[in-house]
Amino acid sequence: MDRRCPAAHPEDPTPCVGPVSVRVLDAAGAVADGCEHHGARMLASLARGSVYALPEAPDGVAIRVFKAADGIRPFCWIDGPRTTPSQLSRAENRARQGC
């Protein structure tokens, strides 16, 4: 089995995309480094999370992860109906509010 980045959730079946290039922080200050793909998926699943580029990361990586996370539903690998705000992406919640 291929090793995945630390930001990959154990239940998320998707492989890493690219090298580890971002650091994702939760509201309590816990951190996980990850590829762009898993960094975005992790950020989408956090309330008040943030993302930073690692020192050797390509330009713009943190903003790409931030923008991608906006359209990803929290814990997007879990199947089932998604109806409450906590189950929808930030973009979906803004659209529901007419923003």
Image (cartoon, grey):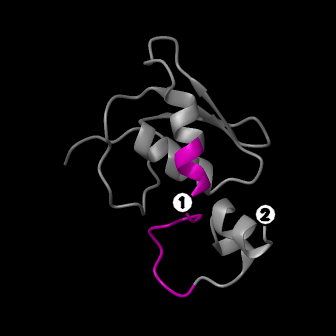
Measuring 41% from the left and 60% from the top, which residue is drawn there? 12
Q: Residue furthest front?
A: 98
Left or right: 46, with 74 as reference point: right
Numbered range of the magenta stretch:
67-81
Q: Amino acid at mark 1?
A: Ile
Figure check: 31 above or below 48: above
Q: Secondary structure at mark 1?
A: loop
Image coords of residue 13 (percent x, y):
33, 61
Q: Is residue 90 magenta?
A: no
In the picture of the structure, the residue carrying the numbered disc 1 is: 72
Q: Is residue 73 magenta?
A: yes
Instruction: Name the amino acid type tagged 2.
Output: Cys
Dot 2: element: loop
Q: Which residue is mark 2?
A: 99
Name the residue rendered at 32%, 43% in the picture.
Answer: 16
Q: Quadrant of residue 6?
A: top left
Q: Is residue 94 above or below residue 69?
A: below
**Residue 71, image x and y in percent?**
56, 58
Would you identify the image quadrant in which residue 82 lies? Answer: bottom right
Which part of the image, by quadrant, shows the C terminus?
bottom right
